[in-house]
Image (cartoon, rainbow, N blue to C red):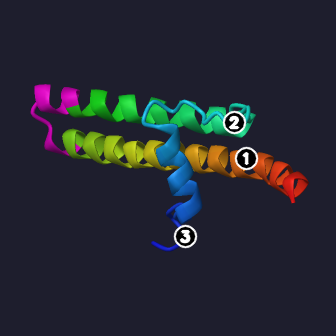
Amino acid sequence: MGAYSTSPPRSDASAAEAQAEGQAGIPAASGESTPPRRTLSSILSKVAAWFFFVGGIVAAVLGIAGLHVEVTVVGLILACTAGLVLLKLRTDTEAAAVDAETAADEPEQADQD
């Protein structure tokens, strides 16, 4: 499962481009970049993950306040799992943006040859 649950690593070329862009996420001056398209499924999955994350935190707090160990443990498990899903969605979105930017740069390189 581990091999299929992570995003593919970026190549050295895309890592160098990302480093050239800087930490602020400002696109390089080589060309215009468009923001990644947001699909309905990606929006719904992020909303559901945030809902479960906040619900887990609330359940954990209520479990601690009421001294209910089972409720606290379930809330923490729910919040941690939802947090991992949110991180996975974030990396997938960033990887898709890098792929779209790379695909947009390829026709320009073909014209230069």
Number of residues whose C-alpha sits closer than 10 Å to that of mark 3, classed few (under 14), some (14–19) or many (20 or more): few
Q: Which residue is drawn at 50% across and 63% down?
A: 6
Q: What stretch is highlighted in magenta?
A: 61-70
Q: Mark 3 points at which residue?
A: 4
**Which residue is found at the position 54% from the left and 30% from the top?**
26
Dominant SS type (magenta):
helix
Q: In this view, does 65 lie above or below 37?
A: above
> Mark 2 highlights which residue?
36
**What whole-number distance in Å separates the C-alpha atoms at marks 2 and 3?**
23 Å
In this figure, which residue is indicated by the disc labeled 1?
A: 100
- Tags 2 and 1 touching, CB below 8 Å: yes
Tell how many labels: 3
Please tell me how crowded label 1 is: few (under 14), some (14-19), or many (20+) other residues with Cα within 10 Å.
Answer: some
Which secondary structure, mark 1? helix
Q: What residue is rendered at 56% in x and 64% in y?
A: 11
Assess disc 2: are there few (<14), some (14-19) or many (≥20) residues with their C-alpha within 10 Å of its C-alpha: some
Lateral position of residue 73 relative to residue 20, left or right: left
Residue 93 is situated, as x and y percent measured from the top left of the image, at 59, 43
Q: How far apart are marks 2 and 1 (CA)?
A: 8 Å
Q: Which of marks 1 and 3 is in front?
A: 1
Q: In this view, does 112 lie to the left or right of 50?
A: right
Is residue 8 visible to us here?
no
Point out residue 7 in the picture as x, y percentages from the top left corner: 54, 60
Q: Are marks 1 and 3 in contact (CB under 8 Å)?
A: no
How far, Cα to Cα, is label 1 from label 3?
Answer: 21 Å
